[in-house]
Amino acid sequence: MEASSPAKLYATLVGTVLTIAGIIGFFYSGNFGSPGAVEKVFGILAVNGWHNVVHLVTGLLGLAAAGYAARQYALGLGLVYIAVAIWGFIIGSGDSILSIVPVNTPDNILHLIIGLTGLAAGAATPAGAPARTAPA
């Protein structure tokens, strides 16, 4: 079990928030078209079924990784979400990534924040301390 660290806090908090966001998103749109019916959660964030699945998967991965691979999760998710944010900014608001995951400017900003905090949490967490041995 990994000791408390910025990465573990990140994996736990972001994992929880993304999991809840994925569940809430299905109350707005569960359409799996290309991109299908896109709705805005709380009138702000564009979602559809695929976007909700991405949030659920990345959130559940964070909750699973919090105990043993939090640093890897924070760094990996950070890189992925920064790439998604940049991709979203390039294609523009109201378009969709891979023609199935809708994004808008608030989504892109949120993805960028999740990515940057992931990299920060991963960088602030030591790579791995050597295992302690019991005194003889």
Image (cartoon, rainbow, N blue to C red):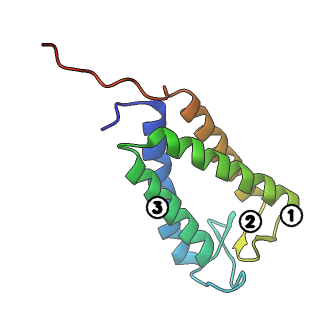
Going from the N terminus, do you reach mark 2 or mark 3 first? 3
Which residue is depicted at the point 87% across and 58% down? 90
Going from the N terminus, do you reach mark 3 or mark 1 first? 3
* Above/below status of 11 relative to 132: below
* Above/below status of 18 relative to 33: above
Left or right of residue 19, residue 75 in this image: right
- Residue type (three-letter) at the residue carrying disc 3: Ile
What crowding class fits label 1: few (fewer than 14 Cα within 10 Å), some (14-19), or many (20 or more)? few
Label 1 or label 2, whichever lies nearer to me, is: 1
Left or right of residue 26, residue 89 in this image: right
**Mark-to-mark CA distance, 3 and 1:** 27 Å
**Extreme top residue here?**
136
Which residue corresponds to mark 1?
91
The image shows residue 8 at horizontal and vertical percentages of 43, 38
What crowding class fits label 2: few (fewer than 14 Cα within 10 Å), some (14-19), or many (20 or more)? many
Q: Report the number of numbered marks.
A: 3
Left or right of residue 55, residue 135 in this image: left
The image shows residue 74 at horizontal and vertical percentages of 54, 42
Label 3 or label 1, whichever lies nearer to me, is: 1
Does the CB distance between marks 1 and 2 fall below 8 Å? yes
**Mark-to-mark CA distance, 1 and 2:** 9 Å
Going from the N terminus, do you reach mark 1 or mark 2 first? 1
**Mark-to-mark CA distance, 2 and 3:** 18 Å
Which residue corresponds to mark 2?
103
Which residue is depicted at the point 59% across and 47% down? 76
Label 1: element kind: helix
The image shows residue 122 at horizontal and vertical percentages of 55, 34
**Extreme front residue here?**
136
- Residue type (three-letter) at the residue carrying disc 2: Val
